[in-house]
Image (cartoon, rainbow, N blue to C red):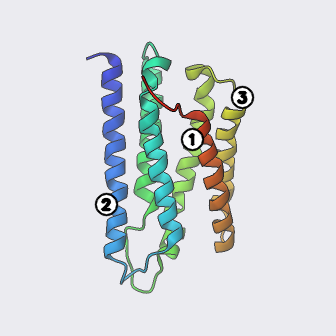
Amino acid sequence: MSAFGYVVSILMLILGLGITELLKDVVDAFRNRKTTPLDWLPLLWAAIVFVEQMQFLWAIFELRDLIHSWTAEKFVVMLFLALLLFSAGALVVPRIFKEGKSAWQIFQQNGRWTLAVLAVYYLVAFLINPPFFGIAYFDPYNILNLLLSVFLVLLLFAWTRKAWVWGTIVYVVLATTEIILLSPEVYQ
């Protein structure tokens, strides 16, 4: 097996575990909906994290053509990105279901830290795109990563539900744009 094969295997294993964790937590939240009623906003963030995880899985196929020789540094950075997405998936859906607490209140305590993890993910992507993939720091595509990172940090400190709703809508538009612009349509 080539170095690329080992790297891909480890990244896919971590992402697979993260996806499993996220989906299990969504099912658990559904099962506990009588104790803690579901809330669409945390579930939307779970869907967002799921899409980000799928996007990273899709992007792994591109690594063979973009990185011809693997160094420990490149491996550790890609591993760190996969671990960030795993962490985002593990944090986003409430795990503790308490009578009298809404899913939104539980999300505000724990799930909101998913945004901090995603902000670090986008910041690392912004920083590694030039040396790893040849995308200039001030390329509009790369600036979008930085913009997403800053936006998530700002949204993390929003406390009103209205701010979260509007912030989530803006984030979905920006992240969808980023995914469309940076994803190849097909891999050969």
Label disc, if present, on residue 139 of the rendered structure = 3
Kind of residue sitting beneath label 2: Lys
User: In percent of the image, x 41 and y 37: which residue is there?
Assistant: 57
Residue 85, x across and y down, in percent: 45, 45
Along the horizontal axis of the image, is 28 left or right of 105? left
- First in sequence, mark 2 or 1: give its number: 2
Where 140 sits versus 24, above or below? above
The image quadrant where one finds the C terminus is top left
Q: Secondary structure at mark 3?
A: loop
Q: Which is more foreground, mark 2 or mark 1?
A: 1
Where 105 sits versus 147, above or below? below
The image quadrant where one finds the N terminus is top left
Question: Badge 1 is on which residue?
Answer: 179
**Disc 1 residue crowd, few under 14, some 14–19, many 20+, Cα 10 Å:** some
Which of the pair 180/39 is nearer the observer? 180
User: In percent of the image, x 68 and y 48: which residue is there?
Assistant: 150
Along the horizontal axis of the image, is 73 left or right of 151? left
Kind of residue sitting beneath label 3: Asp
Label disc, if present, on residue 24 of the rendered structure = 2
Which of the pair 35/188 is nearer the observer? 188
Q: CA distance from mark 1 to mark 3?
A: 15 Å
Kind of residue sitting beneath label 1: Ile
Residue 146, x across and y down, in percent: 67, 40
Along the horizontal axis of the image, is 43 left or right of 120? left
Residue 4, x across and y down, in percent: 36, 20
- First in sequence, mark 3 or 2: give its number: 2
**Disc 2 residue crowd, few under 14, some 14–19, many 20+, Cα 10 Å:** some
Q: Secondary structure at mark 2?
A: helix
Where 44 sits versus 144, above or below? below
